[in-house]
Image (cartoon, grey):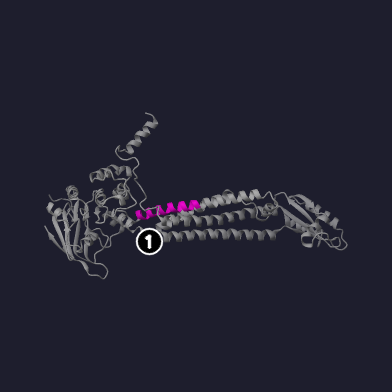
Amino acid sequence: MSIAAKARARAAAAFPTDPTLPANLRRNAPLVPTDTAAGRSLAAVIAILTFLAGLCAGAAEMVATNAAQWQSSVAQEVTIQVRPGPGRDVDADVAKAEAIAKQEPGVARTRIFSKSESERLLEPWLGSGLDLSDLPVPRLIALRMSGDRVDLGSLRTKLVAALPGVASLDDHALWLQRLSTAASAFVGAGIGLVVLVLVATGLAVTFATRGAMAGNKEVVDVLHFVGAGDDYIARAFQARFFGLGLRGGGIGAACAILAFVIAGLVTGSASSGPAGQEIEALFGAFHIGWRGFFSIALIGGIASLVTGAVSRLTVRRYLG
Amino acid sequence: MKSLLPGAERPVVQFEHVGMRYGLGPEVLSDVSFRIAPHSFQFLTGPSGAGKTTLLRLILLSVRPTRGTVAIFGEEVSGISSEKLTLLRRRMGVVFQDFRLLDHLTTYENVALPLRVQGRSESGYRGEVVELLRWVGLGERMHALPPLLSGGEKQRAAIARALIARPDLLLADEPTGNVDPALGRRLLRLFLELNKLGTSVIIATHDFGIMDAVNARRMVLNAGRLRIEE
């Protein structure tokens, strides 16, 4: 006998079919009515809350990713500032500072900003067309790091020793710290909002479950009379609310993911223009990556689980 | 022949000086004492408002007595755990006067409910449910939802639901109230068959035609007091 024939025989033995029994007879409908106006409203509330939580999580993920990118690109570059002083040859000082920097392991590339380039950097503040030749404009040397750990302390000490009061090293640590603090605060606020939204979901489900219990008092009574225990009834309500939570959470999470995908496509197509480039420079790339999409889907799943668990607890308390 | 097993012939239901009042209202049942023997068949009768439904609710353990003691299947029910309560209810079948079918479930699903809540698989009880539905004349209506059933069909579905798990005790509140006399007699025969198979039966009814058709004990309630006519 073939494997398929054996499987068919086993299935026939396990589920004997009555030839006179209607094939389309509904046999195991949910014990608690699901497709009610209250159920649809609750699913809509859960969908909206999940959508908002998904937006918060996606935004937090985007900020965290962009902040990490900014930090890594900024941290790869440090600047030496050489100030002109009375009786000093600033070009010689710049050359000396560059030579010290080049000897330092981990410095991949150096680039001296010429006098005119340094003056141009002041244009946003002082305006163009001014003669700055009399002003003691500091000269800058941009150092590109190779990625290995560079001992910036040693480089700073050498610069101060060779050019005291003239050269200083700016590793952007303060700016990086502020950026990191701001990003962490934003991510923390995002996580807090997600938690708040999940708590709100739990409260909404508590009230909805109480309403459903009151509305289905007769169902509960009948289930008791036919021999269903409290735990069985609680499971029936949990299944019903988990289903609603899954529907609401799924719709909300899908909408949030769709919103980020559309926003990413829109900003991606707009980034070819100057305005788009400005926006991208300011806010970073508008995409949340697989981790962001996974977080949003996870929120949808958690909202469903919260819905099921809270409804079960509420029913147990109601019956107890 | 008397059973040699200890406790085998314990009464299915035993009331001792039971009194019952709702809130601060008057006593609905006063000093009610009786025993329902295993395999027995009896009618519970009396005028409307005499306390029949309250007495059935006490047996079903949906209310507790204000005074006196109630024992079901030998288990004194004051302070009973919810798990034991569930097990006791699984040994009872009940037909409500207002049927209490679940409107969102089909007739088949309603009748199968007592077996489903026991955790049995649908394929395991399908044949029994269909057979019983056909026996009570609902073979063609197993798809239908209760709001689409006539009063008589609802009653038959409620009776089938009470019988499907072959209970040790059957309580029926006016089970023939909405059916024609011929079907009423047929349903009575079904209750008698069930009784012969060992189920104790209590039928609450006003229908003297049904009561006169069977030589059975009558429990007559009047103004909350019980009189037994053997």
Residue A247 among magenta residues? yes
Q: In the picture shown, does residue A135 fall above or below B138?
A: below
In the image: residue B45, left or right of residue A92: left
Q: Which region is colored magenta?
A: A231-251
Q: Position of residue B38 (x, y in %)?
A: 17, 53
Q: Nearer the viewer, residue A84 or B63?
A: B63
The prevailing secondary structure element of the residues shown in magenta is: helix
The image quadrant where one finds the N terminus of chain A is top left
Inspect the image, locate mark 1, and give the three-letter code of the amino acid beneath it: Arg
Occupied quadrant, residue A120: bottom right
Residue denoted by label 1 = A317
User: Residue at (37%, 53%) from the top-left corner?
Assistant: A33
In the image: residue A189, left or right of residue A160: left
Callout 1: residue from which chain? A
The image quadrant where one finds the C terminus of chain A is bottom left
Q: Nearer the viewer, residue B69 or B64?
A: B64
Residue A98 visible in the picture: yes
Q: Position of residue A169 (x, y in %)?
A: 76, 58
Occupied quadrant, residue A216: bottom left
Q: In the picture shown, does residue B72 fall above or below A27?
A: below
10 Å neighbourhood of mark 1: few (<14), some, or many (≥20)?
A: few
Residue B76 visible in the picture: no
